[in-house]
Amino acid sequence: MVKMLWMINRRKGEPERRKIITRINAYHGVTVATSSMTAKPYNAEFGLPLPGFLHADCPHFWRFGLDGESEEAFTERMARNLRDLIEREGPETIAGMFAEPVQGAGGVIPPSKGYFDAIRPILREYGIPLIADEVICGFGRLGEMWGSDHYDMEPDAIIASKCITAGYYPMGAVILGEKLANDLTEASEAAEEFPTALPQQAARSAARLP
Ligand SMILES: Cc1ncc(COP(=O)(O)O)c(C=O)c1O
């Protein structure tokens, strides 16, 4: 997903739009890139995160709420801090924000009340896609097909794995919303990376075969 965003932005003439936002206590994996997105202190052992991987606040009201702060005020502060982060870094340099609906390995942390409703308009305002990491929450774990349905996240893309095969076989998926799918199709036509199975493309590829 990160590589798709980078490729799309480069092909759209926005090569500087590369930074990735995740949240403190996020868990997204163990590769160099996904460890950089996994915002747990132990990744400092590896000299991570890599530059350009930014960690926003963890919306855990019980843990990070201030004395006397209501949950609503906490959510507003989370959103304000996210806006500050985006503006400090430069909105035109941010490729996307990744979020688990409920943060899983970081401590099973549901977001504070209204969290996704508060951050969604900020991301939209700056043209930053929201990507739901549904590796743990998808396929009914929160009572609906997607955890993002449960929280009305309205993500621009979904990452899924684990439950696709009930864990019997390792398989993951990146599911793009219409806008990103169109952007990727356009970018991949030129780059011939992440080829989409459009009939014209398939024909062109076949024509090149000996
Ligand atoms: C929310 C979330 N995202 C990503 C991953 C990483 O999955 P994988 O190790 O298959 O890359 C995990 C693993 O537990 C996860 O919980």
Image (cartoon, rainbow, N blue to C red):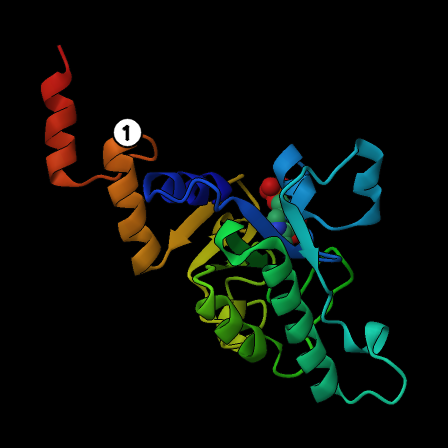
The percent coordinates of residue 26 (x first, y second) are: 70, 55
- The residue nearer to you, when weighing 90 against 199, is 90
**Residue at 54%, 79% in the rendered image:** 117
The percent coordinates of residue 104 (x first, y second) are: 70, 60
Q: Is residue 160 visible?
A: no
- The residue nearer to you, when weighing 87 against 173, is 87
Q: Is residue 27 left or right of residue 190?
A: right
Q: Is residue 172 above or below residue 192?
A: below
SS at circle 1: loop
**Residue at 13%, 17% in the rendered image:** 208
Q: Quadrant of residue 97?
A: bottom right
Quadrant occupied by the C terminus: top left
Q: Is residue 158 visible?
A: yes
Q: Is residue 188 above or below residue 125?
A: above
The percent coordinates of residue 103 (x first, y second) are: 68, 62
- The residue nearer to you, when weighing 70 against 25, is 70
**Residue at 79%, 33% in the rendered image:** 47
Q: Is residue 109 left or right of residue 45?
A: left
**Residue at 58%, 67% in the rendered image:** 141
Provide the residue designation for mark 1.
192
**Residues packed near mark 1 inside 10 Å, few (<14), some (14 to 19) or many (20 plus):** few
The percent coordinates of residue 162 (x first, y second) are: 56, 49
Q: Quadrant of residue 80?
A: bottom right
